[in-house]
Amino acid sequence: MNWWRYTRKPSVPERRERARREGRELERKMAKSGRKPSPVRIEGRAIASTFWGKAWCGNLESYRDYAYRLPRGRSYVRHDAVLDLDIGAGRIQAVVSGTQLYDVDVSIKPLAKAHWARIKTQCAGEIGSLIELLEGRLSDRVMGIVTDRERGLFPKPKEIEMRCSCPDWATMCKHVAAVMYGVGARLDAKPELLFTLRNVEHGELIAAAADLQVPSRRARGKTIEEAELAGVFGIELAELPHARPSPKKKRPAPAKRSGGKSRAAGKTGKNAKANRRGR
């Protein structure tokens, strides 16, 4: 064996051309099952440009476990090596161009119910609409909540299981790293996929805010009503006993007089007046 012999690394144009050829081949294979590949295309140097895409990549890069493989992954995704990327509930499936085509399968545990409930409570009233949420137009406080490494939406290494058909023994090979960066690029266009991936419904963040506001509005309305009544009548409503009002007593009807007695009494009265005048 010649130990001085080495394999020349392909240039960037050569790698992109190989990815295009393999992409066309993959498209023909997938056409038989009625599906089209969904490749990741990066324009320029930045892998992600929106809030959710940048947040995903930033979270990925915050873990030392992945530091060694991430640079190669960035190179692969920038050179169009991720030929197909499919994101579903708790899973990521992809095909990556390397020495040959490799299948990547990533499983992510769903967000714990208690964890999700805490995020909804903390964000309640802070998010105006779903459009605002998905476009990343959030307050600094909400952004801090959802991107927190321990308590946010993004998965931690212990919640991720990675598999690749390549012979690399590493937990995160360069093909898996490329796919994980590809997820960040995909979130630029479809940020709702993050919630799909974590098995939660993004609309619940808005619904939770509405549920918390309804009781408070009712309570405020009741307090104002009582305050107004107390001001008008000059009484302390809280001290009034809750007793039922006593029923009103009916007045007895006046007794009817007979017609004869009334006429006789009238005549007697007239005679008495006449006698007084004569005197």
Image (cartoon, rainbow, N blue to C red):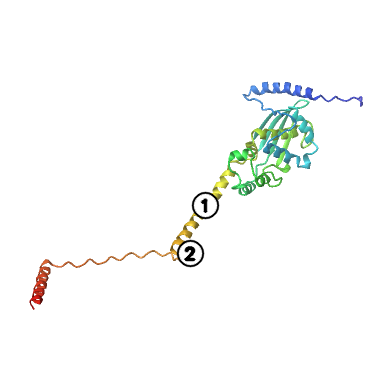
Q: Front-most of 147 and 171?
A: 147
Side (left or right) of 269 relative to 117: left
Q: Quadrant of the image for the N terminus?
A: top right
Instruction: Identify residue type, mark 2.
Output: Ala
**Given the current orientation, which residue lies at the most extreme bottom position?**
279
Q: Residues within 10 Å of mark 2 (few under 14, many from 20)?
A: few
Q: Which of 245 and 264 lies nearest the eye of the viewer?
A: 264
Are the residues flagged by discs 1 and 2 in contact, CB closer than 8 Å?
Answer: no
Few, some or many residues within 10 Å of mark 1 (<14, 14–19, 20+): few
Q: Position of residue 114 (x, y in %)?
A: 63, 48
Instruction: Compare marks 1 and 2 and give the one earlier in the sequence.
Output: 1
Left or right for 248, reference 28: left
Q: Which mark is residue 217?
A: 1
* Position of residue 63 measured from the top left corner of the image (x, y, whole percent): 76, 42
Residue at position x 66%, y 47% in the image: 141
Q: Of 2 and 150, which appears nearest the observer?
A: 150
> Residue 70: horizontal and vertical position, in percent?
78, 36
Q: Which element is circle 2 on?
A: helix
**Residue assigned mark 2:** 238
Location of residue 132 by image quarter:
top right
